[in-house]
Image (spheres, grey):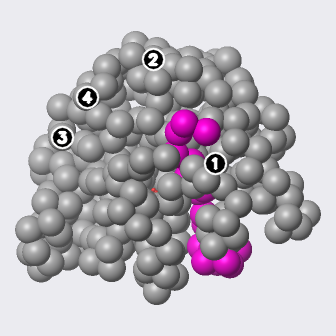
């Protein structure tokens, strides 16, 4: 399979919610258009930010259909298809392929009991879409990510990289070195995007790119142009806002901050907690103090 390496700033797209937790399709299309207008390089759907595992199968398919249609080929789209049961992930992967997605990704199987079960799960998903690149979604620390990727390379012809959400840049680099031209290791910790780029990660996927896509676009421009100092400075600025989001609970804060930008995407799906009403004014003040509006307007 001829793989292309993906590049740049990829929001882990929020899935705007209706009052009952379904998909607000028109806001989803609007958010997609907003982010494309900001110059993002790709979109990652139904991940932990997009609440794929909090949605029903039909809702996940609705997200993939809506976004791929709205994007209309302007930027690549990867669909996260991770589920508890392998066969459900297979169905979602096949659907993603049918609607024209550019790749699929999956978390480790949540109820695995052995490393072998992770391999079986990933092999089945990847084999169900042999024409698409497949990206395991690795959380650093909990698994030996390097050993897992080595094993997957031996067993899965269309494994094309990974989404690595960990803070260990030494491990990240080791995974980058496993592949060649078509290999993409997306970094997944927004807080470290510039630093992951400095060790060779060509692209990043993350939550806070829904809010401040232009900052990450400029981090990438700086990295590509060799201006590592500017990349670092932008990273440290955007991290001030990320720290505020963490303080208030990332996902409740994310939906509230989208409202600040004029996009009412509802609230996170339970059991993720919405921001408490009495916290909202204080949160807005903290965003302002962290320089949110200038960063969001980039
Ligand atoms: O992978 C996100 N990670 C998780 C993406 O949701 C586990 C990140 O984008 C974080 O939300 C972000 C903020 O800590 O780095």
What range is drawn magenta here? Answer: 130-147
Q: CA distance from mark 1 to mark 2?
A: 20 Å
Q: Is mark 1 within 8 Å of ligand 1?
A: no
* 238 or 66, nearer to the observer: 66
Secondary structure of residue under mark 4: loop
Residue 106 image label: 1
Residue 74 image label: 4
Where residue 7 appears, as percent x and y from the top left, is 29, 54
Q: CA distance from mark 2 to mark 3?
A: 19 Å
Residue matched to label 2? 66
Secondary structure of residue under mark 2: helix
**Could you tell whether 87 is left or right of 168 in the image?**
right
Tell whether label 3 touches label 1 (CB within 8 Å). Answer: no
Dot 2 or dot 3, earlier in sequence: 3
Q: Is residue 156 above or below residue 228?
A: above
Dot 4 or dot 3, earlier in sequence: 3
Q: CA distance from mark 1 to mark 3?
A: 26 Å
Where residue 235 appears, as percent x and y from the top left, is 24, 69
Tell whether label 2 touches label 1 (CB within 8 Å). Answer: no
Residue matched to label 3? 39
Where residue 38 appears, as percent x and y from the top left, is 18, 38
Asked if residue 140 is among those painted magenta in the image, a careful observer would answer: yes
Q: Is mark 4 within 8 Å of ligand 1?
A: no
Residue farthest to the bottom, as pictured: 170
Dot 4 or dot 1, earlier in sequence: 4
Tell me which corner region of the image, top left, top right, bottom left or bottom right, holds residue 183.
Answer: bottom left
Query: What residue appears at the point 35 percent right and 36 percent down from the top-left corner?
Result: 76
């Amino acid at each position: 399979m001829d793989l292309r390496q993906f590049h740049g700033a990829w929001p882990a797209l929020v899935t705007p919610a209706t009052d009952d937790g379904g998909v607000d399709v028109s806001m989803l299309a609007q958010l997609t258009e907003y982010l494309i207008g900001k110059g993002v390089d790709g979109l990652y759907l139904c991940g932990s930010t997009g609440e794929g595992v909090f949605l029903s199968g039909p809702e996940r398919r609705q997200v993939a259909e809506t976004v791929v249609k709205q994007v209309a080929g302007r930027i690549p789209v990867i669909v996260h298809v991770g589920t508890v049961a392998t066969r459900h992930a297979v169905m979602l992967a096949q659907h993603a392929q049918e609607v024209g997605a550019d790749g699929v990704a999956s978390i480790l199987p949540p109820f695995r009991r052995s490393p072998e079960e992770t391999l079986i799960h990933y092999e089945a998903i990847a084999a169900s879409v042999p024409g698409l690149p497949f990206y395991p979604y690795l959380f650093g620390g909990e698994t030996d990510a390097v050993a897992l990727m080595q094993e997957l390379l031996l067993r899965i012809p269309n494994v094309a990289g990974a989404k690595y959400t960990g803070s260990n840049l030494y491990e990240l680099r080791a995974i980058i070195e496993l592949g060649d031209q078509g290999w993409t290791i997306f970094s997944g910790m927004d807080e470290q995007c510039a630093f992951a780029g400095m060790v060779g990660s060509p692209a990043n996927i993350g939550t806070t790119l829904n809010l401040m896509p232009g900052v990450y676009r400029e981090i990438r421009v700086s990295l590509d142009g060799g201006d590592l100092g500017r990349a670092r400075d932008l990273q440290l600025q955007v991290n001030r806002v990320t720290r505020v989001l963490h303080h208030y609970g990332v996902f409740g804060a994310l939906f509230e901050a989208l409202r600040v930008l004029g996009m009412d995407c509802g609230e996170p799906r339970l059991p993720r907690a919405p921001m408490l009403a009495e916290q909202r004014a204080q949160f807005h003040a903290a965003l302002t103090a962290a320089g949110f509006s200038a960063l969001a307007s980039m």
